Amino acid sequence: MSSLRKPAPGPLFAVLAVALVGVVLVSICFGSEWLGPAVVLRGAAHVAGLGESLGHPLQTIVELRLWRALTAVGVGAALGLSGGLIQGMFRNGLASPSLLGVTGGAGLGAACAILLIGGWAPRGVLEAATGPGGLLIPIFGFVGALGTVGLVALLASTHGRLSVTTLLLVGIAVNMCIAGIFAAIQSLSLVDWDVSRAIMAWTFGTLEDRSAVHAETVWGGLLAAAAVVPFVGHELDLFKGGEEDASALGVSVGRVKVLCLVGAALSASAAVAVAGQIAFVGLVVPHLVRLGCTSRHSALLPLCTVTGALFLLGCDLLQRVLLGEGVLQPGVMMSLVGGPFFIFLLIRHRRELGAW
Amino acid sequence: MVGALEARGLVFEYAGDDAGPVRALDGVDLRVADGELLVVIGPNGSGKSTLLRCLGGLARPRAGMVALRGRELGAYAGRGRAREIAMVPQYLPALPDVLVAEFVMGGRYAHLGRWSGPAAVDRRAVDLALAAADVSTLRQRLMTELSGGQRQRVLVARALAQEARVFLVDEPTASLDPEHQIHVFQLISRTVAQARAAVVVTHDLNLASQFATRLALMDGGRLVAEGPVGEVLRREVLEPVYGSALHFGTLRQADGSRRPFVLPWAGGQFEDDSPST
């Protein structure tokens, strides 16, 4: 278990980053029709403003697959990073962004958007929930997620101070309320088959038909979260001895907690807003990094980012290859793969995890 | 002597229950100067640890103030305060996956730049601190692999690496065998000799007698006695606070000076017939 036998974070990050680029490329090549890497690179270069278009329909196909892959990378990275930030802040490996109401809030926001759309365009509601057109749903999802975290943080703070234990309890309570409202919406919308189906489809998550806007949204959230890493990485390591100990060493504990919360909320909200509920990435990825490499946050957080991206895109590619396109939604797939995988990890590393 | 840290009229209250807040400190005045090792003694719940937290800026008093080198403690930012005051906590959670050297480097946080890692000066401070605390050989060990005594010395080493001029130490010998108890106090004593100030909370009256330059006795959130060791470790002062199961004697030291010792011994006639007294 000595950390000395584990790979060094720097080289590991480089290897994972190269692997990620490879998986992105293969993910774009692979589809109903295999495209050669050269074609994909030429098409991608055109999107970046370099070189000529591949022409219709090839350029459109490459672009669709490119945005899908970039969205998946952004979503995986954002969820992995927010998981690392939240677990570091809570000093608890069971914490995840959904604990703060990110997933529940996004679901509620998306359901509201679906109800709105269903009011005036009942036929198009399913397409809006899962297809490229419905920007209203990601926007509502993002606002719902961010608003819920804000509410949790507001209720949990006393005199401007955030207690981590209170945050946890308030998060659980607010999640319960939101789950109740969400269930009520689902139950009331059962009479409208289109709306009810659209809400259910959203909860499974989707990476299909993602556009540049989706990719930009999630990458925006990811970059905002990445920006806080230099200000919390070393500090979270000093949190391991408790907040008071960190404060005695000179850490501005309150500022670190707020930065972690804002970074995690922005990135996770952006991720669930564009791709729906995708379980386990935020919870499992930080554990993978801790068990496989390091628990030092200045290295763990960047590693969570690249591992999360690789994990989501890799699993997605694998199920597309094995099962075919569009058979399993990413949220369902991550639960099916992530759950057993997490149990396997827990059994194998029971002793190490017990002490974390 | 320069006043390093000074508390005036400190009042601290915990939230408590329906009966209202619980007053842990009730108007405490205290002053420690460079070169002084002030030991704070007192029964459980007398407010010693709360006093230390207030002195270190970790708890905000309801009334009164703490001044660090003449300036109000609140005026110092987190890092600025940590460059002046180092704390040795009584308890830290288990720290799996943390090497001793990394842990001690944590003491350098207040000196590090945001965008640069530890520099040569930081590594040197860690080396010196490890050597001073006699734990250099443990630097590549995991914190979870240490014995109680080793762990306590590593905690002190981290505070030394902080290169602060005021040390606040909470019960450093609570779980140590006699040899390590003396080691830790010698270490603090040597540090204080380098023009630094220390406030040490302990239950061990005899270690206090041996190493303190001054003693403060707390009871019920108040400072009930303060002064040289010989003035505080007396039956008239201690019995009202600790009860009557204490026996008093004196030991002559190598330099000829005499130091009191206090032995908790319930009931019976106590007679000290050891040749050293």
Image: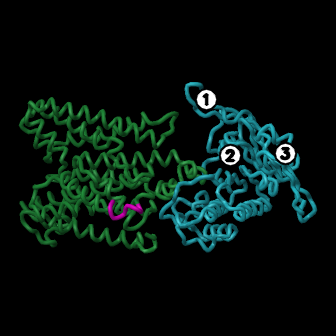
User: Disc 1 or disc 2, which is closer to the eye?
Assistant: 1
A348 drawn magenta: yes
Name the residue rendered at 11%, 32% in the picture.
A190
- Decide which of tag 1 and tag 2 comes sooner along the chain: 1
Chain ID at mark 2? B
Q: Is residue A248 above or below residue B277?
A: above
Under mark 1, the amino acid is: Pro
Taking the image as shown, residue A89 lies to the left or right of residue B86, namely: left
| Crowding near the residue tagged with mark 2, few <14, some 14–19, many ≥20 C-alpha atoms within 10 Å | many
Q: Return the residue found at the far front.
A: B268
| Crowding near the residue tagged with mark 1, few <14, some 14–19, many ≥20 C-alpha atoms within 10 Å | few
Q: Are marks 1 and 2 on the same chain?
A: yes
Q: What label does residue B232 carry, if any?
A: 3
Under mark 3, the amino acid is: Val
Q: Are marks 3 and 2 on the same chain?
A: yes
Q: Is residue A313 above or below residue A225?
A: below
Q: Quadrant of residue B164?
A: bottom right
CB atoms at circles 1 and 2 under 8 Å apart? Answer: no
Name the residue rendered at 20%, 68% in the picture.
A25
Q: Return the residue found at the far right.
A: B256
What shade has chain B been given?
cyan
What shade has chain A been given?
green
**Which residue is disc 2 drawn over?**
B52
Mark 3 residue element: helix
Q: Is residue A155 above or below residue A138?
A: above
Q: Return the residue found at the far top.
A: B19
- Residues in magenta? A346-352
- Decide which of tag 1 and tag 3 comes sooner along the chain: 1
Taking the image as shown, residue A104 lies to the left or right of residue B141, namely: left
